[in-house]
Image (spheres, rainbow, N blue to C red):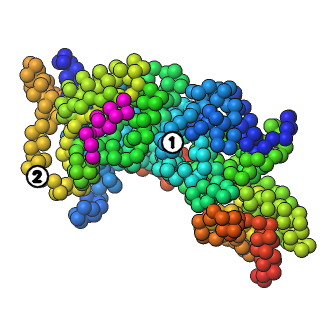
Amino acid sequence: MTVATLTYAQAAALALQQAMHADDTVVALGEDLGRGGVFGQYRGLQQEFGRDRVIDTPISEANIMGAAVGMALAGLRPVVEMRVIDFALCAIDEIVNQAAKNRFMFGGQGRVPLVARLPIGIWSASAAQHSQSLEAWFAHIPGLVVATPATAQDNYSLLKSSLASGDPVIYMEHKELWGIEGPVDTALEVPLGQARMLREGGDLTIVTWSRGVAPALRMLEQDGLKGAKADLIDLRTLWPWDKQAVFESVTRTGRLLVVHEAVQVAGFGAEVAASAAEATGCRVARLGAPRIPVGYAQVLENESRLSPEKIAAAALALLGSRR
Amino acid sequence: MPLPRLFELYRLMRRIRAFEDAAEIASQGGVAAWGLAASAKPALVRGPLHLSTGQEAVAAGVCLNLKREDLLTSTHRGHGHTLAKGADTTTMMCELFGRASGTNKGKGGSMHIADFSVGMLGANGVVAAGIPIATGAAQALKIRKLPHVVACFFGDGAANRGPFLEGLNWAQVYQLPVLFVCEDNRISATTPTGTMTAGGGISARAEALGIPALKVDGNDAQAVDEAAARLIGDVRGGLGPRLLHAVTYRFKGHVSVDPGTYRDAAEVEAAKLNDPLLVTQRQLLAQGAAQTDLDAIDRAAQAEIARALQVAEAAPWPAAQAAYEDVMNSGAGAWR
């Protein structure tokens, strides 16, 4: 067991470095990887593994993703960097029609073991085309895994699990989490589909992921619920997702608030809320961003951001409501 | 060209033609489409069936230059490529019929036919989608230091999609072992491609990126074979990507139920005089081949496909449970 304090970006780099050491077929491709990637999450890897395994590519998102599918079919395990999720929309055919469908459509003849990194979320002052959280799009697509790590530990462990899964994984780091630090235990395995209970309360259940975790935790630490106690669950992966953990909690609490930075309308929170209500009859509420593009000016951007105050208000409203 | 090679091309083309003709007949009925009513008799081949009838020389001429370990990506019109790469016609027909014994276990059908066991990585329902996949497969071969090459078939319509530029640029930047084959049937679904395509043509687009290209008569299997041999030789020799522009003609509609009435009937009839099978027949006879040998090849192809039809019609359907298999490892079993 080795425990070190690492940033979220360093934790991912370490996981990839170890995977590349363990398996010659693991390669990474994307724009500017030789310079460490936009967020430093590939720092040092090209120097260590060479330009054939950490591949700088043209600005050709469709071909980056499509080539990764071809590489996977021809015996490699590519890690694909899309820079920010907004750019992955240039590769949507390659993700949805090719990577996700290949195995089934061809009758199981091939596998597409690739990890596509699509950093999500508001990146301060980056405005409408660099700030989206589109996890629900990909959770909707059969064949894809969707991972949304919130901590350095999970960014290490989930990246390793994703690489080992053999499935096409949409791996969604959050653009504003790269610098957060935390302890990373390299022996700790986190299977895909296993949520983490951060707080146990009993009056209501709060389910969130990615950038939603920190403000929810802060809200509870500041007693935002005015004495009421909540279970706080970090879902960690959206497909597969840990229904058992969520259902078990809401069976006790009877109330579920799902919190995410993505637009609330048709967000993955709706799926979690509906599933929990169907399974347990619990009362549900959602908190996501309004259905507006993310604005540039701080006052505009804030309208799309989560905060402990917004989460507290939504939770208190749910606690105050009657069945 | 030595007579045995010409015979080989002819045999391959004849098998493809027999397959396409049989599939076409089996696709009749069932669905209402293209202004035609559905017939009472359900079709044995359901859904869109894109026939390569008339384009067989491209598949045959290119694929005879490939080895089993070489890889291939195809288009929505991919039966000919699949067969020419070495797939079994019975297993292919079973797939068109949607049977469990098909190449794809009945999960893909005509439009997604694939046979990985012979390096055929799949037909594709999205125009140009095979191009990036081919470049990645070629890159993997290069990274893994394997001696094989990739052949990437696409149509004339694909050259107007972004992945064409991205993929050709990519292959040239990394000097990848891939042969791009533009199987130019001159029509994009129902619109003449020439009316939709700017500039000096497909070869010019490749050459603008520094990729050497050859243009050939795609109805002349011998010409395709010779050009493909030269280009694949270069690719195999590590000289980087090459492009073959083979100009051919689609005898049928866009899909089997499309009567293709938007084309001038005289144009189609004129094109049929240049049927690739007739072209090769004439070359064979001119070189002293006996008509009886050609007839024997024709009969053998018909017999092979008749057997394929027989097996396919009797083959079992997939179990409904198979809809839940081959999806993914993670979370398998939870589908809602």
State the image quarter where residue A185 is shown.
top right
Question: Same chain, marks 1 and 2?
Answer: no
Q: Position of residue A89 (x, y in %)?
A: 52, 53
Q: Name the amino acid, label 2.
A: Ala
Residue B233 vs residue B40: left or right?
right
Q: Is residue B176 left or right of residue A49?
A: left
On screen, B36 above or below B321?
below
Spatial separation of the CA atoms under disc 1 and disc 2: 45 Å
Asked if residue A304 shows in the view, the reply is no
Residue of label 2? B265
Q: Look at the image and give the residue range highlighted in magenta.
A: B198-210
Badge 2 density bin: few <14, some 14–19, many ≥20, Cα 10 Å: few
Closer to the eye: label 1 or 2? 1
Q: Chain of mark 2?
A: B
List x then y, in percent, for residue A250.
78, 68
Q: Nearer the viewer, residue B3 or B169?
A: B169
Q: Note whether B64 is above or below A100 in the view shown.
A: above
User: Does the stretch in magenta take in B313?
Assistant: no
Q: Secondary structure at mark 2?
A: helix
Reply yes or no: does residue B203 show up in magenta.
yes
